[in-house]
Amino acid sequence: PIFHLPSITHTVWPWVTEKDYEAVRNRFLWFGSRGMVHKGLDLVLEAFTKLPDCHLTVVGPVLNEPEFADLYRKELFHTSNIHYVGWLDTSSDEFRAITERCIAHVFPSCSEAGAAAVIETMAAGLIPVVTYESSVDVDDFGVLLEDDSVDAIVRAVRAIMEMSGQELHRRARQVWETARSKHTPEQFERSYRATIETILAKHAK
């Protein structure tokens, strides 16, 4: 049997009461670690070149992959609506400020065992826009991409932009509450204990 254990958020942010959802509806984040193509940054960059009325902030160690950085130099460093930051500690004030200025995390990965980067931004109240392969349950608060294409990303981003401020607030709040209830170290401990106890009970028989 396969047992599902929750991914863990390492930073539990307080709810941001003063966030202006009308003002941030066109601001998005790509955040990830190594493997830019694996995690879909190439697709996201290409999508946002078609979305000049939207802004994308890129947080990740892109310069550690020089071939990728060179291939996407124009998109990363010379496109007015795309802002490259580099790698940040998720517990830093700078990372927190970025999440407060964004509405959603776009992460079209081709394979994850519960994308830790997405869980981290969910804890900050960002709406997840993910592929099925990212292995993140988005319920009715996130957006599951139709496929891992540039056009699917464009459609998903535009769909979020067209939501009312009230709907964006509802989704963000549900995202934040889900991270706090399902993805804390305490919840992982409870799930892990229950799993081990289930396995031991079965073998004891």
Image (tube, rainbow, N blue to C red):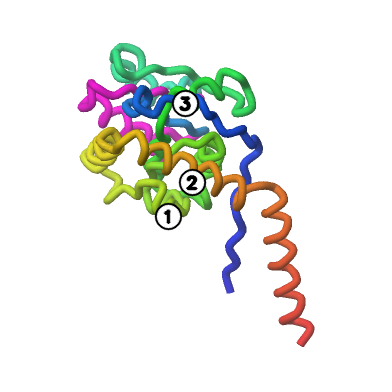
Marks 3/1 in contact by CB < 8 Å: the verdict is no
Residue assigned mark 1: 139
Residue 176 at x, y percent in the picture: 53, 41
Residue 65 seen in the figure? no
Residue at 61% in and 25% down = 89
Vertical placement of residue 115 versus 101, above or below: below
- Tell whether position 36 is magenta: yes
Q: Nearer the viewer, residue 35 or 94?
A: 94
Residue assigned mark 2: 174
Looking at the rendered image, the quarter that the N terminus falls into is bottom right
Give the residue type at disc 1: Asp
Callout 1: helix, strand or loop?
loop
CA gap, disc 3 and disc 1: 23 Å
Residue at 74% in and 63% down = 193
Callout 3: helix, strand or loop?
loop
Residue at 40% in and 39% down = 107
Residue 81 at x, y percent in the picture: 30, 17
What segment is highlighted magenta in the picture?
Answer: 34-61
Give the residue type at disc 2: Gln
Marks 2/1 in contact by CB < 8 Å: the verdict is yes
Say whether disc 3 or disc 1 marks the residue closer to the N-terminus: 3
Callout 2: helix, strand or loop?
helix
CA gap, disc 2 and disc 3: 15 Å
Residue 66 at x, y percent in the picture: 43, 21
Q: Residue 19 carries which label?
A: 3
Quadrant in the rendering for residue 52: top left
- Tell whether position 80 is magenta: no
Give the residue type at disc 3: Lys
CA gap, disc 2 and disc 1: 10 Å
